[in-house]
Amino acid sequence: MYHGVSTMFDSAQPSQNLSKYTISLTGSQISVATYGIVEFLRRRAVYRGTFAVLGIVVLLFSFASMAGMKFMFASAFGTFSLLFVGPWLLWAATVSGPDFTLVFAAKKAQEERREAEKQFEKSTRPKMP
């Protein structure tokens, strides 16, 4: 500790992962964006609650729209697309809580890369000089 400021190197003990559940994400662009949104929500409980309420409202409007009620925004976005947005909002609000950790599946990606390299070596294609 230096002048009241601590750094990550000050603690002798490594940080412990206190989450109960780990969710693996792929390396796609949507997964990276989801990770960023979830980490943003993790630090802001008010926004996390807003996401959850908005997810419930979107689902209710989607089901009401399918039942025959007419909403101007539902016709602009499409009822079925809103059926994907509502659950995603609820999911993001849920996994941004303290019991969840989002990680990128590096181990799986390494295994897939090794398998692809082995298949490439076994291929009957002529080798480049």
Image (cartoon, grey):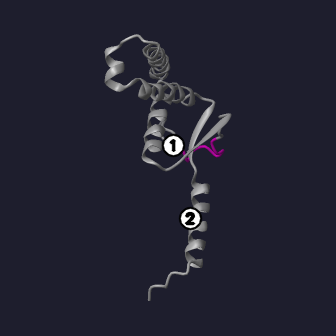
Q: Residue at x 55, y 74 (%)?
A: 120
Residue 100 position by quadrant: top right
Q: Residue at x 58, y 50 (%)?
A: 105
Where residue 80 appears, x then y in whole percent?
44, 27
The magenta stretch is: 7-15
Which of pointers 1 and 2 lies earlier in the amino acid sequence? Answer: 1
Q: Which numbered disc covers residue 42?
A: none
- Farthest residue to the front: give it: 68
Give how far apart the Cα atoms at labels 1 and 2 are: 36 Å
When the figure is inspected, residue 105 is found, relative to residue 46, above or below; the finding is: below
- Type of amino acid under label 1: Thr
- The answer to whether residue 8 is magenta is yes
- The quadrant of the picture occupied by the C terminus is bottom left
- The answer to whether residue 40 is magenta is no
Q: Which numbered disc covers residue 7?
A: 1
Q: Residue at x 45, y 44 (%)?
A: 32
Q: Main secondary structure of the magenta part?
A: loop
Count of numbered tags? 2
Taking the image as drawn, is residue 43 in sight? no
Q: Residues within 10 Å of mark 2 (few under 14, many from 20)?
A: few
Taking the image as drawn, is residue 59 in sight? yes
Q: Which numbered disc covers residue 113?
A: 2
- Front of the two marks 1 and 2: 2
When the figure is inspected, residue 102 is found, relative to residue 122, above or below; the finding is: above
